[in-house]
Image (cartoon, rainbow, N blue to C red):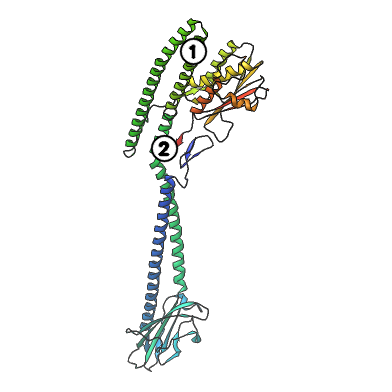
């Protein structure tokens, strides 16, 4: 059976939903996953930028606060010298070359600090030239430098007059910008982990929501499958408001098709009765005449009757094949025909071999009987002592999983390849010594063809003829959403 997009066959033979690229579920999930990924990525970039800006701004504020603490801790003593012992309460200012430094300088001699933190030596203090980087209106300036250990530091300087002195001093505070980068990296890593878990959880939740949302469609498909297989007459069950009109239209279409089939059957039956009765009267009248011409006309009338019946049957099959068909268990039909054949040909041994007892023919019982009856009758007519009927629940051709095969073999003389082709032509009789009209195999071929099957004639392993028919079988697949 041809699978629709988004369906696949499981190990147990059921049809389950799969995410194929051309399935509706895959498209919805892909679009939501793409949107979620883009939204989380954009949100992450925005939050990371905001966090970095806030961290850098807080870093500058921290340096400024340290500068104010130093300003408040120094003064000029009675001798006019700078005095004080700034204590910023941060152990990084006493750790050597930590990247956190402070110093108080005389503006006229910035290369000779008056006091400084234990974390830096005198030679490690670098003051940019004021002509290159002037102070702002608040007598402050920021600069990014690299210390002796390679630390990327942010240096803040502030100018001030201490006490009544006319000397201009500079307070210098520097902090390691690597600490800011570490905070940003830690924040990005935590945010990335959280967003990844959130995105994966959202995609999984979306997948199950889509499955749940599409379940009514799979239920409707199952119901339609049951109708097509003959297990139901209409789509049953309760459906959401969006799908209920579709189910109603399908039920209306099924009813319309059923009416067309019934009307076609009635018309075919009426036509058959209208033609059969005059032909029967003509045949009876001509047989009673007992002259060569009448006998010839009677034979032609009988042939016309057979031809009319054959084409009426083909019309009936064609009218049913593309609408709702019946399902006929194969084994009971075979067993019934075997009982008849054993009575008609008691000298022939009939053997039934079956690999699947439950296989069912997707079609009318009378058509299956006509096909198998003609094959068995033909085999028994030419068999020496043995006829074998082999029922295979799966077609020998693996490309036709929706068909089953029946092979009827005999131990008779068989046919050459050219004769096999001739035997399928309507009215051809290769052995005039045997009774028959020559229509049997042709009728089999016509009926099988109308059902979309295949008919082959091969050589039997017993030396005779092997006739194989491939017919559509009832499917057992169920679709799950």
Q: Is residue 205 left or right of residue 400?
A: left
Q: Foreground residue, 387 or 87?
A: 387
Q: Which residue is mark 1?
A: 297
- Give the x, y percent position of residue 30: 43, 51
Q: Quadrant of the C terminus?
A: top left
Q: Foreground residue, 411 or 31?
A: 411
Q: Is residue 306 left or right of residue 58?
A: right
Q: Secondary structure at mark 1?
A: helix
Q: Is residue 224 above or below residue 142?
A: above
Q: Examine the image and state in which quarter residue 35 appears.
A: bottom left
Q: Is residue 410 above or below residue 13?
A: above
Q: Is residue 147 above or below residue 248?
A: below
Q: Examine the image and state in which quarter residue 74 appears.
A: bottom left
Residue 11 tag number: none
Q: Is residue 376 left or right of residue 131?
A: right
- Give the x, y percent position of residue 214: 39, 41
Kindly indicate whether the residue at mark 1 contacts the one at mark 2 (C-beta within 8 angstroms).
no
Earlier along the polypeptide chain: callout 2 or callout 1?
Answer: 2
| Residue 354 visible, this angle | no
**Front: mark 2 or 1:** 1
Q: Which residue is mark 2?
A: 218
- Give the x, y percent position of residue 394: 56, 30
Q: CA distance from mark 2 to mark 1?
A: 60 Å
**Residue located at (47% from left, 45% from top):** 20
Circle 1: is it few (<14), some (14-19), or many (20+) Cα within 10 Å?
some
Q: Is residue 135 left or right of residue 299?
A: left
Q: Foreground residue, 184 or 368?
A: 368
Q: Is residue 107 above or below residue 95?
A: below
């Amino acid at each position: 059976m041809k699978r629709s997009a988004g369906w696949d066959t499981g190990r147990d033979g059921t049809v389950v939903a799969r995410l194929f690229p051309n399935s509706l579920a895959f498209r919805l999930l892909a679009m939501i996953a793409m949107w979620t990924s883009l939204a989380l990525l954009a949100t992450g970039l925005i939050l990371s930028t905001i966090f970095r800006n806030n961290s850098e701004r807080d870093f500058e504020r921290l340096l400024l606060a340290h500068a104010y603490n130093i300003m408040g801790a120094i003064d000029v003593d009675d001798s006019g010298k700078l005095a004080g012992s700034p204590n910023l309460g941060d152990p990084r200012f006493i750790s050597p070359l930590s990247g956190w430094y402070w110093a108080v300088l005389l503006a006229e001699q910035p290369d000779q600090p008056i006091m400084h933190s234990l974390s830096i030596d005198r030679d490690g203090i670098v003051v940019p030239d004021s002509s290159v980087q002037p102070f702002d209106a608040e007598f402050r300036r920021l600069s990014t430098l690299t210390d002796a250990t390679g630390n990327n530091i942010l240096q803040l300087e502030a100018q001030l007059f201490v006490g009544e002195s006319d000397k201009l001093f500079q307070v210098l505070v520097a902090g390691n910008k690597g600490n800011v980068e570490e905070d940003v990296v830690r924040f990005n890593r935590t945010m990335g982990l959280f967003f990844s878990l959130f995105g994966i959880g959202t995609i999984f939740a979306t997948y199950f929501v889509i499955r749940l949302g599409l379940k009514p469609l799979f239920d409707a498909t199952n119901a339609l499958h049951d109708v097509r297989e003959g297990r139901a007459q209409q789509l049953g069950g309760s459906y959401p408001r969006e799908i209920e009109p579709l189910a109603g239209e399908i039920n209306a279409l099924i009813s319309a098709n059923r009416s067309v089939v019934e009307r076609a059957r009635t018309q075919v039956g009426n036509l058959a009765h209208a033609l059969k009765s005059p032909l029967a009267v003509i045949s009876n009248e001509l047989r009673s005449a007992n002259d060569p011409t009448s006998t010839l006309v009677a034979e032609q009338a009988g042939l016309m009757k057979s031809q009319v019946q054959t084409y009426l049957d083909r019309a009936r099959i064609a009218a049913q094949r593309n609408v709702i068909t019946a399902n006929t268990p194969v084994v009971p039909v075979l067993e019934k025909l075997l009982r008849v054949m054993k009575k008609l040909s008691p000298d022939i041994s009939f053997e039934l071999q079956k690999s699947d007892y439950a296989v069912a023919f997707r079609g009318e019982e009378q058509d299956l009987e006509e096909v198998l009856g003609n094959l068995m009758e033909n085999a028994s007519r030419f068999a020496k002592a043995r006829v074998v009927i082999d029922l295979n629940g799966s077609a020998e051709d693996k490309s036709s999983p929706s068909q089953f095969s029946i092979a009827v073999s005999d131990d008779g003389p068989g046919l050459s390849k050219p004769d096999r082709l001739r035997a399928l032509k309507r009215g051809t009789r290769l052995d005039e010594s045997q009774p028959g009209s020559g229509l049997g195999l042709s009728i089999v071929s016509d009926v099988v063809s109308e059902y979309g099957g295949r008919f082959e004639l091969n050589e039997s392993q017993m030396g005779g003829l092997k006739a194989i028919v491939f017919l559509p079988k009832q499917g057992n697949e169920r679709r799950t959403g």
